[in-house]
Amino acid sequence: MAYFPGARGRMHYRRWSVETSAPPVAVVEFLPGSGQHSGHYHHLGRTLAAGGIDTWCLDPAGQGLSEGDPQAPGTLVELAADAVALAGLIRRTVPAVPYFLAGHSLGAATCLAAAVLPESSGCAGLIITGTPKRATALPVPADVAILALHGADDRRAPIQAVRDWTVGHRSVGLREYADAGHDLLHEPVRAAVTADIAEWIRERAAHRHGAAEVG
């Protein structure tokens, strides 16, 4: 079992490692939505790892094997603190590899809250799915590319708020999925969504490597 000390107790995470002799092209930390945990994301983790992307997923406080109250997920500040704590562990374990932060729904909001913290400096990009309307009011981190993926038929977090948000921020790109709802990574479109995430990460990672070589 893999644990680290979090803001409110011992936190559990899963890791899907790249199983080749070549180093990973990138590493991504994924933050599940409300009521979810890392066990819900085996498909994502295995698929990304098979494509050379080292993948870590947090059990939020009170979910999965993490300590905490399942009925009290915590404030966004506390959730972001847990996210950056795991990020520190990831960066120490997988150094010199572009780091990405991703999340679904409440996890998407946590991504945005965590990305503006000093500890998140150097993040190569954010990937957010099912982003709730309230999250679009959060500050957008400067100089960090963001990929928002959203179901056109999302009734829990209607897409129009995200459409309006992306128009106001050049760093945010939006991909819409027709006939898809809120939980994209657990719907029939999950293969396409996962492939789009992997492609975007690899493109951004290659850009980072190229910029580093030029510098």
Image (cartoon, helix red, strand yellow):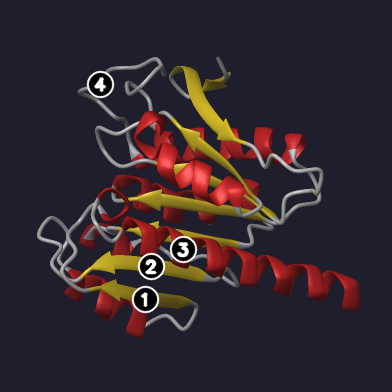
Q: Residues within 10 Å of mark 4 (few under 14, many from 20)?
A: some
Question: Is 128 placed above or below 49 here?
Answer: below
Residue sitting at 63 percent across and 65 percent down? 202
Does the rendering let one see residue 91?
Answer: yes
What residue sits 42% from the left and 43% below the top? 43
Marked residue nearer the N-terminal end (2 or 3): 2
Q: Which residue is mark 2?
A: 148
Tell which of 155 and 78 is nearer to you. 155
State the separation of the CA atoms marked 2 and 1: 5 Å
Q: CA distance from mark 4 to mark 2?
A: 27 Å
As helix, strand or loop, the secondary structure at mark 1 comes to: strand
Mark 4 residue type: Pro
Assess whether mark 3 and mark 4 are in contact (beta carbons under 8 angstroms).
no
Residue at screen point 84% across, 69% down: 212
Q: Nearer the viewer, residue 78 or 29?
A: 29
> Compared with residue 213, is residue 154 higher up or lower down, i.e. above or below?
above
Circle 2 — which element? strand
Residue at which label 1 appears = 174
Circle nearer the viewer, 3 or 1: 3
Q: Which residue is mark 3?
A: 195
Amino acid carrying label 1: it is: Leu
Q: Earlier in the sequence, mark 4 or mark 1?
A: 4
Question: Could you say where residue 121 lies in the image, as x and y percent from the top left?
Answer: 66, 55
Side (left or right) of 154 relative to 215: left
Residue 111 horizontal/vertical position (percent) = 45, 51
